[in-house]
Amino acid sequence: MIRTIDLPTRSRLQTRSARCSGQLAAVTALVFLSAILLTAPISLAQDYETEQQAEEHVSKSDEPKPASRIRSRAITIRKGDTLSTIAQRELGTVGYTAQLAEFNELSLDDVLEVGDTLLIPIQVPADVEGARVVFVKGKVTLGGDTAVEADMMVGTGDMIATGPAGYVSLEFSSGSVVNLQPDSRARITNLNCLEDQDDCVIEIEAQEGEMRSNVEKREGQPVEFRIETPFASAAVRGTVFDFGADADELLVGVTEGEVVVNADDAELDLPEGFGTVTAAGDAPGEPEALLPPPVFRNIPIRMSDEDRLSWWSLSSAASYQVRLARDVKGRETVATWKTEEQSIEIPDADAGHYHVLLRAIADSGLKGFTSNTELTVAAIDDSVAPVPLRVTREGSEFLIKVDTPVADALRREIEDDEDAPSPDKIDNAPPGYEIQISNDESFSDPMSVDVNQLGQAVFQIDADEIFARARVLIDPQTVSVFGETSVGR
């Protein structure tokens, strides 16, 4: 049973980490929480509540507040507890970490001691706002120890960090999305973007790493979107841009809209198609035109470990970035590679349908505009035997046939009889084959075609010789390894 009593003394933790009364007054305008958040935390905390199970958090402000008496319950801090883990366990989301700290007059960096008590408010702010996790892959943590999951809310003050292969996308209520790349750390420092507010204010502190932002705004609601580093900041006006930061420099590139970069008491307007590199302690660097999107040269029907994706070289590019994503905008990126070559393999990707986002990188490190193509990644079934080919030439035509008993039997039966092949032969044949031909033995720029169970195709090519190979097409996303290469002259 919940009792409402006056709080006579502070807990030991509160006494040790006391803050000014103004902070306490700021949380007194709290309203009744839904029944879900009211009842669930009580049952969760029954095993370790103190005898003082229900306390009242009383504002010390002289100014009357509508909700100046806030009921709470006390819990005992256990080994491994942090503000974020307690917020997740007791209030249902780490999005309430900042509110929980403020309620107990603590800072987000305070270390909790085992055995101390912490007050859990039964009411929390009615309009708690945060960014929703719309995609996460790999290791991503909140507050240093809480694993981030899809649909989790990230609130003001929460530090979100990605590991070496971690990706996360945060969506704000206005529709703006921030994508954090691997080895990045960022914190939402200010968020006031509810639909009924005059302005949408989103401020993020970027400590290190890379992020890509797509800033959206509601009709009639101006957006103030700002990213801060220890030595520079970027203010956004409805735009798509890249942001990279470390201890020594800041890189900003604008692919849509406009960004204002501030550093060392100087301001630089960056229009669409330009970027800048700002060194720590210096004014923003001179604007630099972003590189154009590379042009794909060869896009395989499907990619496996035996295939390469290639593009034409850009003379001004120092390297290229290739991202594999589940969506056209790259919000759901699952892997990223950097290469100085003009082609790449796609290793260790799960079979499925993806988008490839290709960008050239300048010597300065700024990334250019993006080329996008769809791609099917196929798994290799090693239990299926590879198939050989026969290549014959008649003039400029090359006839290629899969050289297996089953395919030969099907072709003979069709040639000798107008009726369809017998069902037993069809049942024994694979669903189809993928045939590749190339002008060079390395298949650096191959032409591919899928054929049916007959396993044959005719190519009309003006060439002295061609190289050909085939693999079994079990389904659109599963294949065998390629068989031996055959030469046609």
Image (cartoon, helix red, strand yellow):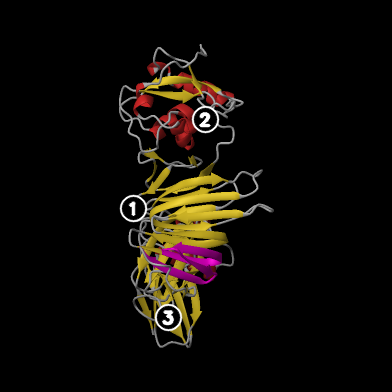
- Quarter of the picture containing the C terminus is bottom left
Farthest-out residue, front: 62
Mark 3 or mark 1: which is in front? 1
Secondary structure category for the residue under label 1: loop
Secondary structure category for the residue under label 3: strand
Badge 2 crowding class, 10 Å Cα cut-off, few under 14, some 14 to 19, many 20 or more, is some
Residue 381's spot in the image, x, y percent? 37, 55
Which residue is the site of mark 1? 164
Residues in magenta? 251-280
In the foreground, 359 or 89: 89
**Which residue type does callout 1 highlight?**
Pro
Left or right placement of residue 401 versus residue 110 in this view: right
Residue in the image at 43% along x and 87% along y: 463
Which residue is the site of mark 3? 392
Which image quadrant is residue 62 in?
A: top right
Residue 268's spot in the image, x, y percent? 49, 68
Which residue is the site of mark 2? 25
Tags 2 and 3 touching, CB below 8 Å = no
